[in-house]
């Protein structure tokens, strides 16, 4: 490999993993969709789940739907970066998701709950955690009821789960309070852009630039004598 190609390979960006969590009804799915539509070079990890499709959801688009037996087999083979049981169904992130994102030169968005986020941070400590908070319990309840998808028992169960989930906010790097969809989407976009500018993420790009100056340093010193 010639010098130019080596420099280009060294400067190749690494995929950043963004982990986004929120209580059910906080608007996470809508905000993730807005983020993916922002043309920032992001890709979404399609989780595996044992639950049945809802409404217009499609296999391989919204989720990878598998049976409980298939899911358990994947767990046994160590195929998941994280997996958790939520409301009686299992969800998991396949470890290939990160590899595929890196190969495509894109950063990865994961939409997972607090259990999965904790597992994933143990395996990928540099992953960026973002927690979406509703403005209040009252507003979260209004949003859950306005969806007209769940029974009263399910709504109460989701509210109880939300109260427990928000206690884990400290394990995340960023908090976005979803009062307004547009403002919250802008906040997520700003987080992605800021993370990409961190010095620690750009060392491979910075190093060849510094070396280009160092190669000329002796000549410069000689002329100044």
Image (tube, rainbow, N blue to C red):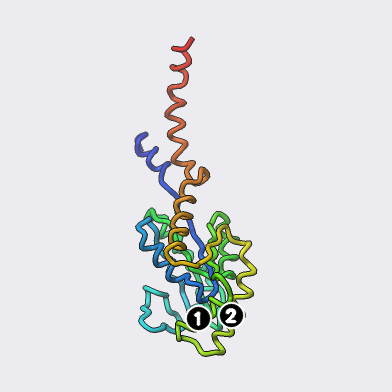
| Residue 91, horizontal then vertical, whole percent | 51, 75
> Total number of numbered labels?
2
Viewer-proximal residue among 133 and 58: 133
Q: Which residue is mark 2?
A: 159
Q: Which mark, residue 144?
A: 1
Q: In the drawing, does residue 129 fall left or right of residue 103?
A: right
**Quadrant position of the N terminus in the picture:** top left
| Residue 111, horizontal then vertical, whole percent | 48, 68
Question: Can residue 73 be seen at all in this image of the molecule?
Answer: no
Crowd tier of the residue under label 1, counting other residues whose Cα lies within 10 Å: few below 14, some 14–19, many 20 or above? many
Secondary element at image label 2: helix
Crowd tier of the residue under label 2, counting other residues whose Cα lies within 10 Å: few below 14, some 14–19, many 20 or above? some
Pointers 1 and 2 in contact (C-beta within 8 Å): yes
| Residue 57, horizontal then vertical, whole percent | 38, 79
> What's the residue at 36%, 63% (across, down)?
37
Q: In the drawing, does residue 160 fall left or right of residue 211?
A: right
The answer for how far apart the CA atoms under marks 1 and 2 are is: 9 Å
């Amino acid at each position: 490999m010639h010098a130019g190609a080596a420099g280009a390979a060294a400067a190749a960006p690494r995929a950043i993993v963004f982990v986004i969590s929120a209580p059910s009804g906080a608007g996470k799915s809508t905000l993730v969709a807005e983020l993916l539509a922002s043309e920032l070079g992001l890709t979404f990890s399609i989780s595996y789940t044992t639950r049945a499709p809802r409404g217009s959801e499609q296999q391989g688009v919204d989720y990878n739907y598998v049976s409980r037996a298939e899911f358990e087999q994947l767990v046994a083979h160590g195929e998941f970066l994280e997996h958790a049981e939520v409301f009686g169904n299992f969800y998991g992130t396949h470890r290939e998701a990160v590899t595929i994102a890196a190969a495509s030169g894109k950063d990865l968005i994961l939409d997972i709950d607090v259990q999965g986020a904790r597992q994933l941070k143990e395996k990928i400590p540099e992953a960026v955690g973002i927690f979406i908070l509703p403005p209040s319990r009252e507003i979260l309840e209004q949003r859950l009821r306005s969806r007209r998808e769940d029974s009263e028992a399910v709504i109460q169960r989701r509210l109880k789960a939300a109260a427990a989930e928000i206690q884990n906010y400290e394990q995340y790097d960023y908090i976005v309070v979803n009062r307004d969809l547009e403002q919250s989407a802008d906040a997520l976009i700003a987080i992605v852009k800021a993370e990409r500018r961190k010095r620690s993420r750009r060392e491979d790009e910075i190093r060849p630039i510094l070396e280009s100056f160092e190669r000329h340093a002796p000549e410069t010193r000689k002329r100044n004598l």
